[in-house]
Image (cartoon, rainbow, N blue to C red):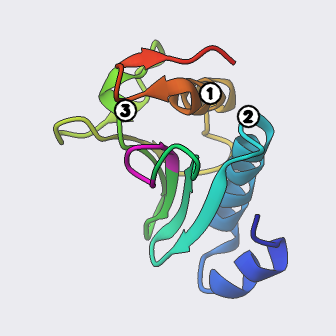
């Protein structure tokens, strides 16, 4: 994984209150999927299982930095259980959760989405067991 120092350097333009959300989401992904590959992209971070494919076919999530919030995106979000109704978006299958502040985040529900996404297999349209 990328070091915290590298992240701080790459995203030094990001306001502190949003960067705190990025770090917390990153910690959650590392906890749920320690073997996940992490890439820095221009808009944020991407997590996927490299041995299964790339960021789309084996994607877990994307942490996208927006001007006023963090967007936690799921390439196959339409397939994820979302009882808290956090996911939004009108694309065919991609969905995202908007996180405007650390204190407003529904962390347990966000963690459940990341966990479900880490187990989703888009080829079989089923969830792998852990």
Residue 124 appears at what percent x and percent y?
36, 20
The dominant secondary structure in magenta is: loop
Q: State the mark number for residue 72.
A: none
For residue 126, which quarter of the picture? top left
Residue 78 figure quarter: top left
| Left or right for 127, reference 75 | right
Q: Upstream in the sequence, badge 3 or badge 2? A: 2
Query: Where is 16 relative to 38, above or below?
Result: below
Residue stretch rendered in magenta on the structure: 54-61
Secondary-structure class at tag 3: helix
Q: Residue at x 29, y 41 (%)?
A: 94
Q: Which residue is mark 1?
A: 115
Between the C-alphas of marks 3 and 2, the distance is: 17 Å
List the residue tagged with mark 3: 77
Q: Earlier in the sequence, mark 2 or mark 1?
A: 2
Mark 2 residue element: helix
Judged left or right of residue 67, residue 10 is: right
Magenta stretch: includes residue 125: no
- Which residue is denoted by mark 2 in the rendering? 32
Image quarter (top left, top right, bottom left or bottom right) of the C terminus: top right
Q: Are marks 2 and 1 in contact (CB under 8 Å)?
A: yes
Q: Are marks 3 and 1 in contact (CB under 8 Å)?
A: no
């Amino acid at each position: 994984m990328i070091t915290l120092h590298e992240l701080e350097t790459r995203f030094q333009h990001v306001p502190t209150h949003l960067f705190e959300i990025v770090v917390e989401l990153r910690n959650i992904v590392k906890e749920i999927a320690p073997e996940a590959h992490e890439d820095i992209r221009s808009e944020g971070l991407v997590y996927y299982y490299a041995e299964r494919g790339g960021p789309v076919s084996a994607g877990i999530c994307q942490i996208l930095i927006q001007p006023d919030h963090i967007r936690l995106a799921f390439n196959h979000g339409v397939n994820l259980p979302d009882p808290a109704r956090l996911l939004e978006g009108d694309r065919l299958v991609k969905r995202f959760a908007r996180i405007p502040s650390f204190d407003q985040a529904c962390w347990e529900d966000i963690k459940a989405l990341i966990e479900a996404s880490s187990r989703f297999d888009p080829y079989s349209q089923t969830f792998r067991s852990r």
